[in-house]
Amino acid sequence: MSLRALLRPDLDDLEEYVPVKPLDVLAAEIGVPVERLVKLDANENLYGPHPAVLEAIARAPFHIYPDPGQQRLRAAIASYVDVEPDQVVAGTGADDLIDLLIRLVSPPAVVIPTPTFGMYRFLARIMRARPLEIPRRPNFDLDVVAIERAVHESGARIIFLTHPNNPTGNPLNSAELEALLRLPALIVVDEAYIEFGGESVVPRIAEFPNLVVLRTFSKWAGLAGLRVGYSISTSELAAHLMAIKQPYNVNVAAEAAAIAAIEHRAEIGETIAAIVAERERLRAGLAALGWLTPLPSVANFLLCAVTGRSARDAAASLRSGGILVRYYDRPDLQNCIRVSVGRPADTDALLAALKEL
Ligand SMILES: Cc1ncc(COP(=O)(O)O)c(C=O)c1O
């Protein structure tokens, strides 16, 4: 019997989601010690977690299953975002919520304005929803008319908007959102980077029950490796998400860490402020090189157009010196690199290496 005959043929041509590699694997591949890596490729918070988070994890009751109702975690997130606990659903990263939303709606198609975060397309394909990728305008604003047309023509019932957008760094503008909220579709606004800039759209949920906001602890709180994110929506939609999620999706260490991060948000806010200030120093340093044009960004990364040389080669040269950045060279994003904003020493190392290229 052929195993292949049992499997879904429509996944044969699934484009692999290219995840970032763990630090030790990268260090071994490049041949530098882990401590020498300057990891500016995944928009993580290089200040790492707050010490209180580490203490909370050490005290977490690992021998007990987590609370499927997520009561303490939902209450803590609700106080952080200023909504009601029954509007919050936590998951193993914002990625889990993207997956749950597509499962809940099971739409024939989803609309994805590109370039953007690759997970929407990947998870839509796995769930048999056709990803309709609508190119953004040259300044990376949304093409609202094309999105409206795509929704009407395809019956897409989810639109993924990223605010600020990854990898371009620009915020969603309110006129675009206003128009799209009137469509017969769930409007998912992914605010993974909102702590670094941009105004949250959460208050609009009261007027528009088709609006869902996604957030994460991966970026601002430095908890990417623990996998904890959440959605904010009407309590009605949240109840549907709670009903279909894996009961124990958020593990006890992640739950304890997220609650501790919220308790210490004021101190973590200081590292966020440092990253935002560093973003502008990094921008000036990159622009001064002459061959990189950093785009305006309200997130913890800068997308730079590369002129007169290859972005791929530049990223490869940086990598051989232990500095990791993302490069893009594809029809919707030609010859660009994206660098995360780290600590001042990370900026210094990156700028010094770029000057050497
Ligand atoms: C726009 C966006 N949304 C979501 C995520 C993933 O968040 P999480 O780590 O919570 O799954 C990322 C990570 O890079 C992202 O860029």
Image (cartoon, rainbow, N blue to C red):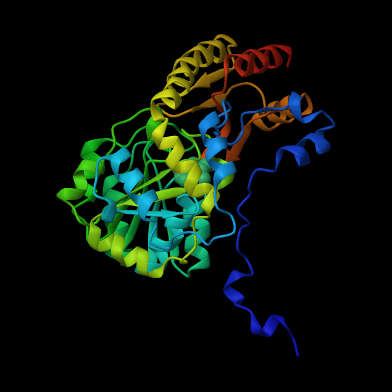
The picture quadrant where one finds residue 185 is bottom left
Q: Position of residue 153 (x, y in %)?
A: 30, 64
**Residue at horizontal 48%, vertical 49%?**
255
- Reply above or below: 66 against 194: below
Q: Nearer the viewer, residue 179 or 232?
A: 232
The quadrant of the rendering that contains the C terminus is top right
Q: Residue at x 75, y 26 (%)?
A: 35
Q: Residue furthest right?
A: 31
Instruction: Identify the residue at the far bottom of this view.
Output: 1
126 over 324 or under it: above or below: below
Note whether 123 is above or below 197 in the view shown: below
Residue 296 appearing in the image: no
Q: Visible in this render: residue 325?
A: yes
Count every numbered label the image shows and give the total.
Answer: 0
Looking at the picture, how far across and down is residue 186, in whole percent?
29, 58
Residue 62: horizontal and vertical position, in percent? 58, 54
Quadrant in the picture for residue 238: bottom left
Q: Quadrant of residue 41?
A: top right
Q: Is residue 35 left or right of residue 282?
A: right
Which quadrant of the rendered structure holds the N terminus? Answer: bottom right
Judged from this view, the residue extending furthest toward the left is: 207
